[in-house]
Image (cartoon, rainbow, N blue to C red):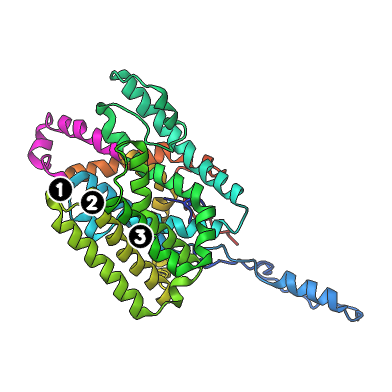
């Protein structure tokens, strides 16, 4: 689970993508008051200006630079990925990952951001990423850990993973629905730490390294079974999404747009075909074709799907700049990206709290009669209302982590100056 933007943005970023510009309003000054007119000034001849002075004056006359925009194509993909995650955790649709592999998309976008950021010193970039990720995680973790302690959890030495989630943080069964999502943060953190080395290896031979990045998941599936512990889980998740992360490098370095369209489409469809075939032919092992339960199928399906999305972006120059004409939708996409960590961390808690809240509605006869209290869609809607509350109450932590002024909601445009 991006995640960079903002901070998350910058971070998980999202100022790292090709930028569009919002129109800038200008105000003219110097108009005479009603009923008066300017008199032509009397001037004396001036000596010709030096070339340096002319250049300086011309520079001053240039309009101020317009504020940078954001790549709304990637921003929209990230917002849709978060919506799909919440939908999957509400309805449990096995087919959701086939329609839109959110995790693969989020790792691909984060890889693009990371490659751009590593144009700066690696240590500085890694430190910045961790600074933007960990404070929102700690803030969220305080509530989860305290709740589990109240419900009988006795932590051991592994509680250190609640400080630095390089392994899955421990917890009890009571709080499992809340903390089970942390595998994404753990995997993202490892990719951040490994990226300076991965990017250097990738640039030695971009296309071969990209293709070979699917080899680790094949090895784990057919040649060596990882241990059933924190190490094994981390290795499996890293291998599953390694291709998507390196695909982000390929997009950033312009490798995708240089590839032949026929080869890209054929190989992507082949990956999709193999991933889908493997998922449907191995349902007996997991009881479902859900990609989240079948790492090999997840890896190949995500590889083909995300490759097509990123190649289309690079080849056709898709940027969704038109989205800025729809102010409310554009603002919503901005909020999703600037609060991506908050939405991801708190969405399961929102869904948990939605259940007892809906139970209270049954005690109100009008609600019982007119509201679809038994519908999962109603749960989905209530969940998003609570997610919005958490964004308002807790989202400021992402601003603080990104060394920005805390805002109730990000993305407000500056007010226009009045003449």
Look at the picture and state if 86 lies above or below 54: above
Label for residue 175? none
Residue occupying image coordinates x 13% and y 37%? 367
Q: Give the SS element for disc 3.
A: loop
Q: Give the SS element for disc 2.
A: loop
Can residue 6 be seen in this snapshot? no
What's drawn in magenta, residue-wise? 348-377
Looking at the image, do the residues carrying marks 2 and 1 touch, with CB atoms under 8 Å apart? Answer: yes
Label for residue 285? 1
Look at the picture and state if 418 lies above or below 46: above
Please name the residue that numbered disc 3 is placed on: 214
Please name the residue that numbered disc 2 is placed on: 294
Can residue 312 be seen in this snapshot? yes
Q: Which quadrant would residue 175 be assigned to in this image?
A: top left
Residue 264 is situated, as x and y percent measured from the top left of the image, at 35, 74
Q: CA distance from mark 2 to mark 1?
A: 9 Å
């Amino acid at each position: 689970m991006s995640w960079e933007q903002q901070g998350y943005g910058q971070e998980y970023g999202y100022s790292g993508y090709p930028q569009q510009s919002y129109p800038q309003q200008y105000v003219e000054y110097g108009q005479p008051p009603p009923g008066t007119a300017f008199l032509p000034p009397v001037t004396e001849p001036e000596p010709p200006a030096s070339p340096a002075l002319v250049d300086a004056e011309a520079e001053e006359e240039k309009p101020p630079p317009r504020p940078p925009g954001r790549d709304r194509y990637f921003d929209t993909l990230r917002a849709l990925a978060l919506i799909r995650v919440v939908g999957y955790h509400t309805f449990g649709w096995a087919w959701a990952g086939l329609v839109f592999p959110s995790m693969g998309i989020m790792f691909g976008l984060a890889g693009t951001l990371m490659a751009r950021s590593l144009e700066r010193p690696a240590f500085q970039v890694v430190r910045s990423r961790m600074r933007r990720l960990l404070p929102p995680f700690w803030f969220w973790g305080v509530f989860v850990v305290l709740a589990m302690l109240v419900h009988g959890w006795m932590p051991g030495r592994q509680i250190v993973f609640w400080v630095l989630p390089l392994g899955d943080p421990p917890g009890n069964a009571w709080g499992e629905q809340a903390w089970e999502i942390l595998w994404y943060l753990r995997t993202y953190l490892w990719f951040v730490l490994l990226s300076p080395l991965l990017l250097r290896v990738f640039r030695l031979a971009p296309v071969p390294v990209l293709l070979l990045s699917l080899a680790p998941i094949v090895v784990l599936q057919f040649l060596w079974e990882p241990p059933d512990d924190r190490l094994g889980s981390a290795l499996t998740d890293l291998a599953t999404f390694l291709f998507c992360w390196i695909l982000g490098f390929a997009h950033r370095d312009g490798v995708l747009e240089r590839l032949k369209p026929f080869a890209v489409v054929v190989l992507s469809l082949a990956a999709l075909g193999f991933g889908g075939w493997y998922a449907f032919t191995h349902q007996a092992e997991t009881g479902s074709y859900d990609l989240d339960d079948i790492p090999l199928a997840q890896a190949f399906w995500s590889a083909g799907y995300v490759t097509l999305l990123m190649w289309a972006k690079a080849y056709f120059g898709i940027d969704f700049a038109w989205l800025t004409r729809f102010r409310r939708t554009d603002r919503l996409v901005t909020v999703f990206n600037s609060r991506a960590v908050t939405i991801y961390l708190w969405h399961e808690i929102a869904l948990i709290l939605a259940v007892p809240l809906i139970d209270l509605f049954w005690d109100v006869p009008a609600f019982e009669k007119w509201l679809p209290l038994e519908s999962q869609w109603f749960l989905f809607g209530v969940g998003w209302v609570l997610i919005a509350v958490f964004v308002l109450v807790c989202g400021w932590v992402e601003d603080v982590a990104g060394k920005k002024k805390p805002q109730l909601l990000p993305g407000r445009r500056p007010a226009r100056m009045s003449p």
